[in-house]
Amino acid sequence: MAKFIDQPMVIEAVGNKPKIIEEYIGAVNSDNEELSIALMRSPSGWVEPGQTPEFSEYTIVLKGMLQVTTEKRVYEVRAGQAIIVNAGEWVQYSTPSEEGAEYYAMCLPAFTAAAVHRDKE
């Protein structure tokens, strides 16, 4: 049966600055544990702790630049570009550039706080 989603749910973000996460599909807004899709808006200078999630994350940048740091490389993902980070891979996301970033993140299976495994601070 189809499930209409009237609006996203705003989820509190982790990091050093306020970031807006609007989950359209996922464990929080649509009770879907198979996949999550969220629109992210990160300000300039935002950084979150590193993590080793149990889900793969597929990211498409709409505006600005998202910095994606893995154990092997630092990627600067710009508007019109995308990146895939596989489940079990250590990653840290940040928006160090002046314009910040706006991007869609899709997680498979869906994002949950229990499955993200953030680094201890």
Image: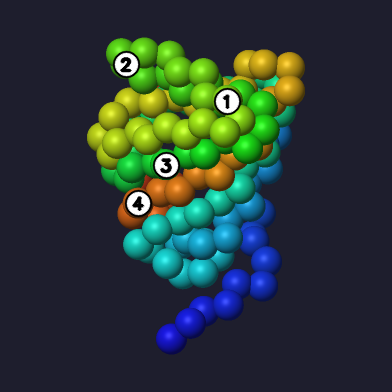
- Considering only order in the chain, which callout, 3 or 1, is on the residue closer to the N terminus? 3
**Residues under labels 2 and 4: Cα distance?**
21 Å
Residue 51 seen in the current view? yes
**Three-letter code, disc 2:** Glu
Residue 4, label in figure: none
Residue for badge 4 = 108
Q: Residue at x 58, y 60 (%)?
A: 24
Which residue type does callout 4 highlight? Leu
State if disc 3 and disc 2 touch (CB < 8 Å). Answer: no
CA distance for labels 1 and 4: 22 Å
Residues under labels 4 and 3: Cα distance? 8 Å
- In this view, the residue in front, 96 or 14, is 96
Q: Is residue 62 above or below residue 93?
A: below
- Identify the mark nearer the N-term, 2 or 3: 3
Residue reaching furthest to the top? 73
Rendered image quadrant of residue 43: top right
Left or right of 41 on screen, residue 104: left
| Quadrant where the image shows the N terminus | bottom left
Closer to the camera, 57 or 79?
A: 79
Of badges 1 and 2, nearer the viewer stands 1
On the image, numbered disc 2 is attached to which residue? 71
Q: Residue at x 32, y 16 (%)?
A: 71
Task: Provide the secondary structure element on which disc 2 rests.
Answer: loop
Residue at image mark 1: 78
User: Is 47 drawn above or below residue 117 in the view shown?
Assistant: above
> How many badges with numbers are in the image?
4
